[in-house]
Amino acid sequence: MPALVRERRDFLQLLIATAAGVPFAGRVAAQAVRVDDAIPRGVFQQQLFGTERNNVSVIRGAGGNVVVATDATWLNAATSTLVVNGGTSAHATNLLGTLSAGRTPIKYLFNTDWHPENTGLNLAVAEAGGQILAHEFTKQYLSIDRPVEWRNRTYKPLPAKALPTKTFTKAGSMDFGGQTIEYGPLGQAHTDGDIYVFFRDRDTNALVVGDIMTVGKYPIADYSSGGWLGGLITATKTLLDLAGPDTTIIPGDGPLQKRSDLQAQYDMLSASRDAFVKMMRQGMSAEEMLTAGATKAFDARWGNPELFVKTSYRSLWLHVREVGGIV
């Protein structure tokens, strides 16, 4: 392991342990959602694309959106499957049952970040001989105890066999099913191990953005995992630059989106950051920012702002030097 990555890992372990020991004010612990608290009755598959050149679909109801591609073409039946995100472990059996209907092994599995709603298939895929691809930092998080203060819990490491088998810190691409699939890092955003996966082929043109984008709720900067509000803005801008006017945006959970929806999130995040920083410079707490209606212009679309404001507030303090003007 390179020295820089090793030193960063040690620093992150210290940072996470420190953050976990700091009380998180207000009602966030009570409202934090445990991803395994409410399990739907099975999963269902929503067809996204199916052409003579590719077969890409989305499965919803497994704890998060699961994107499935096969290498089938109009000349040949599918022989393998590529999956982006694997839902929660609580849904793994049902999800595998859905996927096995195609009788094709999972050859590749991408984790867009380390959170449990994306890594539930890791062990099953690894045991079947598939490859797991993720950011290097995602692998690091999956290999240690992971306190997440705003969720009020600590996640245990995955078994060694379930860890990503191929990691990266720079953009790359691979050929699968007759098309080139691009992937790359998104910096310190939702976490600091977020990635996108882009099915750029014109018959697909789908950009998987993971939990950078949320639908009907505010996106969260997981500061316990290196995320922060400024990075969420930067990552959303990166995705906007990748997407074309007709690109389908696949969020971490919820219905499919358009580029215009991604633009709306970027505008909301940018305006929220400006408002939060202004209020913080006036000495306001997160509770006071909520009382002052810091997000009232956006609540109708994104819902309850409490968790968003409080996690953003903490993340901005952790990047106070970059923000500037806050004492």
Image (cartoon, helix red, strand yellow):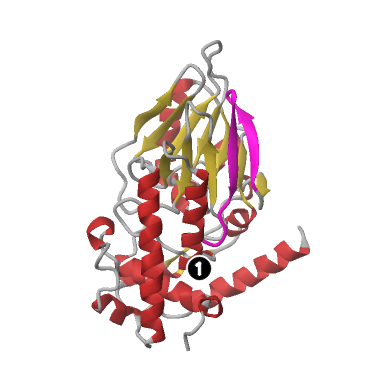
Viewer-closest of 119 and 179? 179
Please say whether residue 228 is visible from this viewpoint: no
Q: Would residue 135 appear left or right of 258 to someone viewing this image?
A: right
Compared to residue 292, the image places residue 260 above or below, namely above
What secondary structure is marked by label 1? Answer: helix
Horizontal and vertical percent for residue 208?
47, 42
Q: Which residue is mark 1?
A: 224
Q: Quadrant of the N terminus?
A: bottom right
Residue at far front of view: 245
Residue 172 drawn in magenta: yes
Residue at image coords 36%, 74%: 275
Horizontal and vertical percent for residue 183?
59, 43
Q: Residues within 10 Å of mark 1 (few under 14, many from 20)?
A: many
Compared to residue 194, the image places residue 72 above or below, namely above
Residue at far left of view: 300
Question: Which portion, as a residue range, is magenta?
Answer: 171-189
